[in-house]
Amino acid sequence: MRYVSTRGQAPALNFADVTLAGLARDGGLYVPERWPSFSKGDIVQLAGKSYAEAAVRVMRPFVADALSEETLSDLVADAYGGFRHAAVAPLTQLDANDWLLELFHGPTLAFKDVALQLLGRLFDHFLTARGQRVTIVGATSGDTGSAAIEACRDRSAIEIFMLHPAGRVSEVQRRQMTTVLSPNVHNIAIDGTFDDCQAMVKAMFNDLAFRDAMQLSAVNSINWARVMAQVVYYFTSAVALGAPHRPVAFSVPTGNFGDVYAGYVAACMGLPVDKLIVATNINDILARALQSGAYAKGEVYPTITPSMDIQVSSNFERLIFDLYDRQGKAVSDLMDTFQRSGAITLGAAQLKMAQRLFVSARIDEAGTKAAIAEVYRRSGVLIDPHTAVGVAAGRRQRADRAIPLVSLATAHPAKFPEAVAAASGVAPKLPAHLADLLSRPERCASLPNDLNRVQVYIRDTVTAKA
Ligand SMILES: *Cc1c(COP(=O)(O)O)cnc(C)c1O
């Protein structure tokens, strides 16, 4: 399988190069040259398989020439062996034909573990085979940092440096990062804001001498391998509910459009997906785009669903690429316009095509809290605020009650305890593996908001280990 850039200029690459490259050199995102096609018979064969077995079958065509089936199986078994639920991504029933897909049984209690646990192992595998090492640098406002750290810890080809704003992440979030004492994990508390941290990471990537000397890399959500890993649970959940013999609808709490785009990929591969409900909070760029065709940046408002507080959804470019018949030039022109003016308008034909599969809803804070309370009252299940946005959007946009609706549960309720307790009256408990989190030793450097000091710290640490 070869991968092409959505902007049509960067060279086509194989799976290993795409995994390590992340962003394409022309600024675009990599996508497979064509969608693998699963027949009804192929989908039937997934029934009764373990998550890891199904994952190998779904991902095999995407990695074909870069990994043997045996290596893929080993990496997948290792990635999902650490999940706390034997089914990895189990379904919970909320009501007749109304289901939750629990994606939060990984180490950091959020769905990002599903993709990142595999991505860390893919990085390590490809780098070790090439005799290379990378330095992963990232900034976090709390949520994605721990998932990236858990993905990269103890991987011999990777050093990871994670910057967070000192005193501005919750204690649980900080401790999920700083109590990982692996020698290749380096937390840095910056005396500044999240934006300061992010600006420093950007500056380090733009400092080409530093970037090359340190072999800087990222594991962010535009990485193709992350999308690929997320396609799997659309298949496993749909098959459990009767696919390929009947269609299934999904409601997906959305920020960067990575998770719901994976549902679109599953549909392109032949899974009978009735509808994909794009659920946003009040940061609703995607809901507006899918309703009117106007993809236009707004102001970012903080909400109780921080992982969806986004007004530019990077992975949307991958959908635009297909809507415009995979014409890199058209995508490149649109993205230049978006970069310049913060707004583009999809053509009428393209909007109509998108609306065949995607519907959307914007859920405000009151609607989010009401969904947490209602699901707890009616079904006795505590859901986190992000999940609640998806559940509420599903209730609003569901067209046909005869079609099973799967709402993706993207975080464990104990990851956002205050909001869940306020809405439901019940304080969610941390799972056993994190019960002693507040008494574990921490390791974290503290540095001023000074790019040079941070670069010196990273260089000294990497050099000392080389
Ligand atoms: C990242 C995240 C999302 C949004 O996923 P995207 O792939 O960015 O659309 C939703 N919920 C939670 C809990 C997340 O961490």
Image (spheres, grey):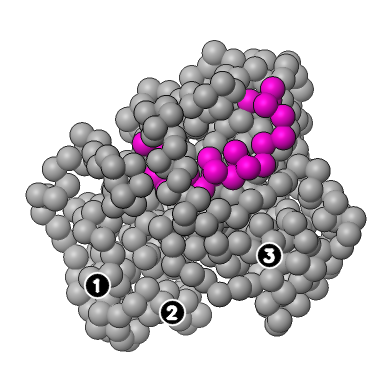
Q: Earlier in the sequence, mark 2 or mark 3?
A: 3
Q: Is residue 70 visible?
A: no
Label 3 sits on residue: 28
- Regarding mark 1 in the picture, which secondary structure is present there? loop
Residue beneath the point at 24% across and 72% down: 166
Q: Earlier in the sequence, mark 1 or mark 3?
A: 3
Residue 379's spot in the image, x, y percent?
42, 27
Residue beneath the point at 47% across and 42% down: 371
Q: Residues within 10 Å of mark 1 (few under 14, many from 20)?
A: some
* Residues in magenta, as a range: 382-404
Q: Amino acid at mark 1?
A: Ala
Residue beneath the point at 72% across and 46% down: 358
Q: Which quadrant of the view contains residue 69?
A: top right
Q: Nearer the viewer, residue 379 or 219?
A: 379
- Regarding mark 2 in the picture, which secondary structure is present there? helix
Nearer mark to the viewer, of 2 and 3: 2
Residue 199's disc is 2
Q: Amino acid at mark 2?
A: Ala
Q: Which quadrant of the view contains residue 304?
A: bottom left
Task: Please tell me whether residue 367 belongs to the stretch shown in magenta.
Answer: no
Q: Amino acid at mark 3?
A: Gly
Q: Is mark 3 within 8 Å of ligand 1?
A: no
Residue 202's spot in the image, x, y percent?
47, 76
Which residue, as the protein is rendered here, is positioned at the far right? 349
Side of 96 relative to 146 (left or right):
right
Q: Is residue 431 above or below residue 150?
A: above
Q: Is residue 142 above or below residue 237?
A: below
Q: Nearer the viewer, residue 362 or 104?
A: 362
Q: Which quadrant of the view contains residue 204?
A: bottom left
Residue 166's disc is 1
